[in-house]
Image: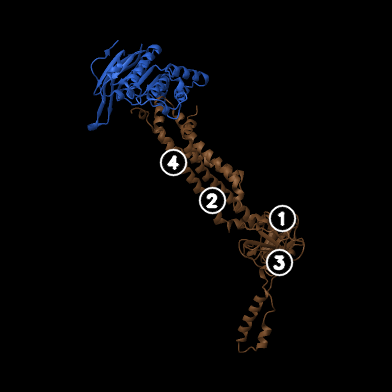
Amino acid sequence: METLRIEGLTKTFGAGNLEVRALREINLSVSRGELAALLGPSGSGKTTLLLCVSLILEPTAGKIVFDGQTIFEKNRWSEVDIRRLRREKVGFIFQAHNLIPFLTARQNVLLPLNLVGIKGQKAENRVRELLEYMEIAHRADNLPALLSGGEQQRVAIARALANTPKLILADEPTAALDTARGAKVMELLKEVARENRTTVIVVTHDERMIKGFDQVYRLKDGCLNGDRERTV
Amino acid sequence: MDLAFQDLKLHKGRFIATMVGVGLLFGIVLAMNGIYRGVIYEGTALIKATGPDLWVVQRYRGGPFNEQSTLPEFFHYSVKSIPGVEKASPFIFYTVERMVDGQSRHFSIVGYDVFGGLGGPKKIVAGRPIQQAHYEMVANVKLGARIDDRIALGLHTYTVVGLTNDAVDPDGDPIVYLSLHDAQEVLYQQDNEEVRNQRERLLRTLSAQNWLTPDKAQKLLDPPGADTHIINAVLVKLKPGISRVQTARMVEKWLYLNAYGTKDEVGLVLKGRLTSMTHQLLLFRMLLLLISVVIISLVIYTFTMEKIRSIAVMKLIGAPDRVIVRLVIEQSLLLTVGAFLLGFVLISNTYSMFPRRILLLPADDAVTFAVAVAAGVLASILGLRHALKTQPAMALGG
């Protein structure tokens, strides 16, 4: 079953002589529980594609179908609907972890649950379960500043998983980690995709990290370079 | 989970320091409220405490507090003869600077008819009222005198027989009550040396005239001493059911004097001698409130700017605007309410140490609190505007 389908997605910045086409006629499709990698050198449009998929940036043209709903075609959804979509169905993992510095690890994972109205013991149980799954439960009451890079990234993954999203978008999740920790994070993402049947799209420029991915899309100058590669 | 509170926990040192600073400002605002009320209270306390039905003063004068009013003492008999007047008492009021207990003190003297007349002290907290025609006084405790103390004023020495604690003049200085004739003597009676000097000056002027012999000049000299039978106002008590307005008209028409009710007299003082001070205090209060708002606004803006990336992350993970609005406004309100309470506790425990009366009224405190809260919300608008404009894309990248 298809989770995400993108047809003819184009993103242009500026106008006239200053016009820059960051994405050109992108087509891709990722099914439920699949792991997809977006590979490409810096400036190739990987992050822009991720931002367009999550409607943080408005595409210039094209169509995005997510979980059976067309979320962008000619008119994008209202900001309220887009934010609801993001908090209910999409999880984000960033290169810089981006945990909220004044919340403890536990509270960072609790926040997305509270945002969808899950509170009290039910929320606490879910947070504990996720932190244990990420093997970070012993640091639950620490502020992000007191956690190592790897620990922060595991908390960020737990936060992304909190609402059992249908899609996880990860932007260079291993860029700030050493090779061993990066590989561990990738293993975790694979586990999440397999066990929770969550679709995971990972932006990376490190080919070593995509072993075991279902699909690999290569971007160059805003274009997908030929057909997708099916690695599995 | 309260995001605003969690954020403040991380910056509690800075938050508390800011709260103390703004709290001191709010404390000053509350003190200014109290000073404003105190000035009005003290400015009108003597008028209200005396509280006759009418104040009869010199024609076209707003006296006796706003400006000088001078009447011959016997005028109170004329006022007494107006139909409807039950009692008419002579009254004298003036400010002096004299030595009391070795120190120069600024205070006011009220002279009144001590044998059943109007205008005496309202409440005596120690001792007794004046019972003799001469050489007794009732003083405010603020003067520093005690019962049986003997205080020299002018030519005589007066014994303190009673104390009051709220009798103050419109400038907040203590009042000393004397019998009418003692008060007149203190003000007008010259000492012997002064009388001799005056007579000598006049004698020399007259002797210089060729047409006057020294014997004739000697005969033209005034008898020694000066006329002390001068008062500032006549206090009137009307018979029951008598119209104050009609009696005042009658006094003005037949005696060619001015007559004011106690309410009019209060109005004269408020519009006259107190007006510039009360306006100044009002302006100062508004300025301080404005400064408080600017400080809160800057602090909240700085707090918001420091967590702009966190706000972007929240937007990225789908936090609705109301979560972000609550985060900013709650911090602003916590700061405002906390600072106000601090200022309130501070001033409530220290107001008695101020040299002038600070009159704290619950209604003033409530209005200031409401204004402070509204100002706190207003102050957060700058930070809020920035927070709501933040793009979630700011959360991405290194």
* Residue receiving disc 1: B122
Mark 2–mark 4 distance (CA, rounded to whole Å): 24 Å
Label 2: state its secondary structure: helix
Location of mark 3 (residue): B157
Asked if badges 4 and 3 are on one and the same chain, I answer yes
Q: Nearer the viewer, mark 1 or mark 4?
A: 4
Which residue in the structure is indicated by mark 4? Answer: B298
The brown one among the chains is B
Which numbered mark, 2 or 4, is in the foreground of this view? Answer: 4
Question: CA–CA distance between discs 2 and 3?
Answer: 43 Å
Q: Quadrant of the C terminus of chain B?
A: top left
Q: Which numbered disc covers residue B282?
A: 2
Q: Spatial distance from mark 4 to mark 3, Cα to Cα?
A: 62 Å
Mark 3, chain letter?
B
* Chain of the residue displaying label 4: B
How many numbered discs sit on the rendered protein?
Answer: 4
Circle 1 chain: B
